[in-house]
Amino acid sequence: MKTQMGRAGRAALVALLLTVLLTVTKLVVWAATDSLAVFSQMLDSALDIVALLLLWLGIRLATKPADESHHYGHGKAENLAAFVQTLILGSLVVGVLVEAAGRLFEDETAIEVPAYALALFVASAAVDVLRVGYLFRAARVESSDALRAGATNFAADIGTAMVALLSLLGARAGWHRADVIGGLVVALVVGIAAVRLGRRSIDVLMDRAPDTRVAEIKAAAAGAEGVTETRRVRLRSGGKNLFADVTVAAGRTATLERAHDIAEAVEHEIARVAPGTDVVVHVEPMSETTGLVERAQAAASRQPGVHEVHNVLIHAFDEDGLSKLHVTLHAKVQPGTSLGDAHALSDRIEDAVVEELGDHVRVDSHIEPWQSTSRGRDVTSSREDIVALVTEIAQREPDVVDCHEVLVTSGDDQLSVVAHVRGRGNLPLDRMHDASVRIEDAARAAHPEIGPVLIHFEPA
């Protein structure tokens, strides 16, 4: 930050010294010629001194970090400085136009244009070129709107200096109206520069969102993993910094941790297309296109006291000419919950699902305690019979390529089995799931002491 302040501040100070030199030069030329075009140039340079002081102060303030009173930092100070420069340019235009209008209706007056005045003006224009080039390079390196505004302002000075020089040459040749016309041209050019300078500053100060950035960020957010819809993107600029508020939709049954992962994925995608953007992501549940199972699971999960909802099944059938649904589900609650409390919670769950899916729904729920961590031990080496059996059963399945690992654990008066099996990578998941159900049933039929069985699928 200090390095950045040093470069930008140094650029402003160098430009300030050059501007003082230009102002003195133009003052000498104006005193020698009484030219309106030269006067407008001299006045412009004098006001540039004030503008550069504001520019320097704006850069100093813009580099300050965010604090308790300015949560988004001080970056807009640069844009405020640029806007003040616009007001200064506007006042110059009005002053020159008023003076030019007065001289248009006066008798032509001869203007003395000594040769040294022309030479001083040429030298002044050359210094202007150096000043503009220096500021534009600094603005590009520092990405500074205030430096860019100052450079644009001074670039207009080069053109107006040339117009003033031509006016002096015209007056020297005997065309006395050339000075007034030159002053009007200077005023018009400076006015156009003022409009261009002010437009971006006002856009930033009024938090106008850059249209191209909105489209880029919206597309990036939509491409993040887990996002089903990008609902709103709001952008605001704070000098060099861009702030984005993004609202996305995700599945209704996503956990808080999953929602956090989705938000981080959105931030990562936005950082790819707009580096340095400060992003806040809000994740909302998707409802309009959610399936019945997910809607039922979401409704049950919302009830206080429910830790997890699983084994949600929905059957559709016709009864007396009406289409109805039958929903069954399992919900886990805190261990030690009484039967009365569990039944009351079951009623609330069923009512919530009916409210979600409609009156044509019947809901039956099973409440079970949330299982905490229990003690167990690895008995794989002593139960080689189960390992061999599960391996044999798995490899009889036509969709299973091999069963390469079986783990047997003892705990809570029962055995649990984990088997790793491989199948073809392009095989539909439902076929592997059906195979796992057959493996589980066959293992329990042979060994009733087996409880939970987990089949881990892997692509061959």
Image (spheres, rainbow, N blue to C red):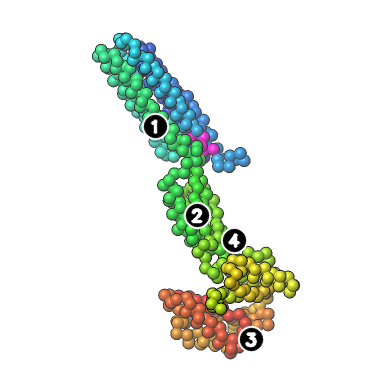
Residue 126 quadrant: top left
Q: In the rendered structure, are the residues bearing label 1 and label 4 in contact, judged by CB atoms less than 8 Å apart?
A: no
Q: CA distance from mark 3 to mark 2?
A: 52 Å
- Say what amino acid the circle numbered 4 marks: Leu
Q: Which residue is mark 2?
A: 231
In front of the other: label 3 or label 4?
A: 4
Along the polypeptide, which appears first: circle 3 or circle 2?
2
Along the polypeptide, which appears first: circle 3 or circle 1?
1
Closest to the observer: 21 or 90? Answer: 90
76 magenta-colored: yes
In front of the other: label 1 or label 4?
A: 4
Q: Main secondary structure of the magenta part?
A: helix
Element class at badge 1: helix
- Say what amino acid the circle numbered 1 marks: Thr
| Residue displayed at 47% across by 41% down | 208
Q: Which residue is mark 4?
A: 256
Tell me, for residue 152, which label it has, or none.
1
In the image, residue 182 above or below residue 213: above
- Around disc 4, counting alpha carbons within 10 Å, would you say few (fewer than 14), some (14 to 19), or many (20 or more)? few
- Around disc 2, counting alpha carbons within 10 Å, would you say few (fewer than 14), some (14 to 19), or many (20 or more)? some
| Residue displayed at 48% across by 29% down | 84
Q: CA distance from mark 1 to mark 4?
A: 50 Å
- Image coordinates of residue 424 in percent, x first then y, are 43, 77
Element class at badge 2: strand
Tell me, for residue 449, which label it has, or none.
3
- Say what amino acid the circle numbered 3 marks: Glu
In the image, residue 97 above or below residue 375: above
Q: CA distance from mark 2 to mark 1?
A: 38 Å
Closest to the observer: 429 or 12? Answer: 429
Q: Which residues are magenta?
A: 74-79
